[in-house]
Image (cartoon, rainbow, N blue to C red):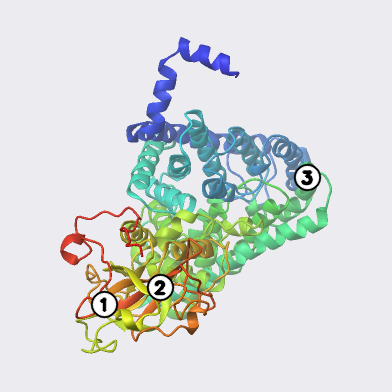
Amino acid sequence: MTADAARIKARALPWVPRTAGWLRGSRAGLLVIAVLVGVGSGLGAVAFRYLIYFFTWLATGHAQFGQDGYVGSSHLPWLGLGFFVIIPVVGGLVYGPLIYRYAREARGHGVPEVMVAVAENGGRIRPQVSVVKAVASAICIGVGGSVGREGPIVQIGSALASTFGQWVRMPENRMRILVACGAAGGISATFNAPITGVFFGVEIILREFSVDALFTVMLSAMLADAVAIPILGSRPFLSGFPPGISLGHARNYLLIAVLAVVAGLIGLAFKAVVYKTEDLWDLIWKNRPEWARPAVGGVALGLVLLALPQMYGVGYPVIYKAVGGDYALWFLLVLAAGKIVACSLTLGIGGSGGVFAPSLFIGATSGMAFGEIAGHAFGPGAGPPALYAVVAMGAVFASAARAPLTSVASVVEMTGDYALTLPVMLAVAIATATSRGLSYGTIYTTKLLRRGQDVDRAAPWRAFGDLKAADAMRPFPRPLAVVGGPGHRDGDGDGGGPGPARLPGRVTYRRDPQAVFAAESLAQALRQLESYGRDGLPVLSGDGRQVRGWITNASVLHAVAREIGNAPPQATRPGPGADAGPAPPPTPLRGYEVVEVTIDADSPAAGQRLGAVTWPPGCIPVSVLHDHRLREPDPDLTLAPGDRVSLLAPEPEQTPAGPRPAGSGPESRRGETHNGTRPRRSEP
């Protein structure tokens, strides 16, 4: 639209820009968009589920397929069992060109693309992604792709939310929240699990917790589920599980812990096989046309389906039969291994679908097998095998995705059995710790890491909350004792601070320093720096007894850059020390002052390195104003006439001659606002 056309439209519909501005700029406007996103993602989840049923019925004659084993298509009876090989090829010829032509980001499981859109692209997702992802994933699953529907519905809901946000030109911070709303709404409506949807949107997509984000995401998740319930029903999603599953005895927590470690390793193996299979197909396919890859790879997928028909599609009916005890122990293990292979192959050949349902499938079958083994070894006291199937579902997904809150909520909410909350929590915690200890990336983030995108380290604003002042400070060679603390002795610092005769220059400035704690976040430290310290501020230990180092604006910026991977480390990060229990800091720091010394032409320090200058006992250089630039106190810096060195010095008993800004004492500091500027110095 040209500028003239836009002006004509604005004159014809003056309420449109006003409404868009209100939606864009007010909190109520964000909630209105969140309502639309919730309703839209709920309807999208319903439509997507029936779209899968339609394409599955079109290919097989059944809404769900595979649970009955070697049964051919009632629509294509003349193909016999050859149907298992042919139909994935036919489907690949349809969804392969569709993805390649209209939205290549719709390939794969979809969640990583949403994560990187939130972390690095301001939440912007192309509008056509929702339509292409829905159709391509429905076809892929309908023709036998052994993947889930959570990845597609997350991408569909997120793309819908991003489209709304882009239409009203929502700022990036709110756009990210809206994308998380779309993901949460899709999960909530798909699995009738609004709490799971909230945790998925915040923990996996948004990857940060805030009151505004939580409330907005909760609103969308609730509305999406409310829209879907009248159509899909209100029963728990996994209502086919046996009722009345219980732990039995407290000693069975030991078996749960063992299962959690095993499930953690299985989750890591699932992730590894997914990406090794993708690498293998990349090597085989090389530079051939990508649109044809799903069709050619469909032959391999079809052979897997021919060998193990239970791998056809999402697989929830097979999970019900496994937990119901319909399969032998050896076949449960075959099903778990087969799902890892079939899902990895579907994604490796360029299919479209999620990994959440396969994780549940793998966990249910392997957990059921563990329960059978435990029953043989320990008898009925080990509890029902279905207990271990439920627990392993959460543990395998927690290991693969490293999302413990989502894992706990999903299993408990989808089974509707809240009595299993405690064993699921234990298993998820152990599986997550196992995964974190053995691997960095998750099944979602590894795809991005292989492209050089690290969403866990790519968001600079998170560093200000995650990092502490101790991470950014320049540590002193030896901590200084705070006056009045247990580590302080009367007479420390040679009896009372630097006098003018003992300094290599004139004292042109003094002030009482405000302190920050080592355990304070960088956001808090920056607020103190902005108000009280252009030269920087002393950093106290957590118990307030020692001055451990010095923090400046520059050191904060370098710590943030180091955290997001853009700068090499320059100083050793101090150990944790005693930073766990912050006490109210002295305001200002008692017993110390910041003294500025100006180096004159006749000063003995002129022309010397900073590290070679002898300072009075107890004085530590904290900054240097050199060539009109505030510098770190580099020992190799050569001092020149006119340089000004700021020292953290013990406060003298009698204030020596030297200007001191009015109102710098403790009694007048409270109402003072510096806004990052220093009080006026006296000039020579």
Q: Against 258, is 625 above or below?
A: above
- Residue 618 in percent (x, y) is at 33, 84
- Residue 389 visible somewhere in the drawing: no
| Circle 1: element type | loop
In the rendered image, which residue does mark 1 sit on? 543
Disc 3: CA contacts within 10 A as few (<14), some (14-19) or many (>=20) = some
Q: Nearer the viewer, residue 411 or 302?
A: 411
x, y (%) of residue 324? 48, 58
Point out the tag, 3 or 2, that comes first from the N-terminus.
Answer: 3
Q: Which mark is residue 558?
A: none
Nearest to N terminus: mark 2 or mark 1: 1
The residue at which mark 2 appears reads as 622
Q: Amino acid at mark 2?
A: Val
Amino acid found under the numbered disc labelled 1 = Asp
Which of 190 and 336 lies nearest the eye of the viewer?
A: 190
Distance CA(mark 3)–CA(mark 2): 59 Å
| Residue position for label 3 | 290
Disc 3 versus disc 1: distance between alpha carbons?
Answer: 61 Å
Q: Residue at x 66, y 63 (%)?
A: 273
Is the residue 202 above or below the residue 616 in the image? above
Q: Locate the N terminus and report the quarter of the image it occupies.
A: top right
Camera-near label (3 vs 1) is 1
**Vertical relation: 307 (above or below) 73:** below
